[in-house]
Image (spheres, rainbow, N blue to C red):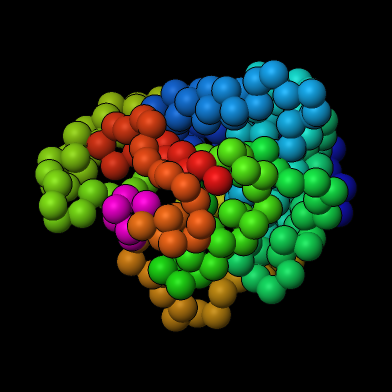
Amino acid sequence: MGLSLATAERWVERWELQQQRYAVDREERFTVIADVVEHVTAGQGTRPLVVDLGCGPGSLAARLVRRLPGAEIVAVDRDPVLLELGRTHHPDAARYVDAEIGAPGWTWALNLDRPLDAAVSTTALHYFDRDTLLRVYRQLAALLRPGGVLVNGDHLPQDDTGPAGIAAHVGQCRADRQRVFAHEDWGSWWAAVADDPELTDLLAERRRREAPAGTGRPAELPLSAHLELLRQAGFATAGPVWQYGESCVVVAVR
C-alpha cells in the first residue's frame, strides 16, 4: 500500500490548507506546543522522547522535529490513509504507529524503551467521553517521567461559569477570517481523496475500521472538565498556557 512521494506531497499540502478552516491560529498553536516541549527538555543529557497522539499525516511531528532535530518522536493514529501520507511525506519526522488511542494494548504498541518527556496532541482528544479520557490521561501519566508534560492543543469550550458564548463567538469570528485562505473543507478533501487510485486500498481499510452507523460522538467536555480529569489522573498541575476563543493549549505537568 505504498504511495509515491508526489501523491503524498499533493494530499498533505491540501490537508494543511483545509485544516486552517478548523484550528484557530493553527500555526501559532503548533509553535506554542513546540515552545513547551523545548522548554521542558532543555539541558537534558538524553535525546528527548515525545509521543504525538492522533498524529494524522505528521503535521505536528514535522514541525517539532524542525525545532528539536535531536528528538525521537513516536506518532500514533488509527487512520491508515493519514498514517501512510505521513510515512511518505514526513518519513524522517517520526516513527509512525498504527494504533487506536484508548483501545486495549495501545500503549504497548508504542514500543517505548524509556519514560516519555512529553506527550503532545492537536484536535484529537476532545472526541473522547469522560471515562475514556480519564483512562487515557492515567495511561499517559504512567508513561511520562516526573516533570514530563502532556501538551494538548484543542477546541475546549468554557463552562457556564465563564463567558462561554462570547468566547465561542470570538473564536468563530477569527476562524471565519482565516477561511478565506482555505479552499476546501474536511468533507471535500476526503471526497477528492476517494478519486485517487493510489489510495484505493488504504481507503478500503479506513472504511473497514469506521465506527458502526449510528454511533454518536460524545458531547465535548469543557476546559474545566479536562483540567479536573488531568488532576484525577495523577498530574501535579494543569492549565492553559495559550488561548483564543475556545482554541487553547493546555499543559499538564507530571
Residue 219 seen by the camera: yes
Could you say which quadrant of the image residue 29 lies in?
A: top left
Report x, y in % for residue 100.
Answer: 66, 64
Report x, y in % for residue 118.
Answer: 63, 39
Could you say which quadrant of the image residue 91 lies in?
A: top right
Q: Residue at x 67, y 38 (%)?
A: 117
Q: Residue at x 60, y 71 (%)?
A: 210
- Residue 58 sits above or below residue 177 on the image: below
Q: Main secondary structure of the magenta part?
A: helix
- 224 or 208: nearer the viewer: 224
Q: Residue at x 36, y 57 (%)?
A: 228
- 216 or 101: nearer the viewer: 101
- 183 or 147: nearer the viewer: 147
Q: Work out which quarter of the rendered image holds the N terminus and state it.
A: bottom right
In the shown orientation, is residue 233 left or right of residue 60?
left
How many circles with numbers are drawn on the protein? 0
In the shown orientation, is residue 163 left or right of residue 68?
left
Could you say which quadrant of the image residue 102 lies in?
A: bottom right
Report x, y in % for residue 49.
Answer: 74, 37
Q: Which residues are magenta?
A: 221-227
Residue 176 seen by the camera: no
Q: Residue at x 79, y 60 (%)?
A: 109
In the shown orientation, is residue 204 left or right of residue 20?
right
Report x, y in % for residue 113.
Answer: 85, 48
Q: Is residue 162 magenta?
A: no
- 205 or 94: nearer the viewer: 94
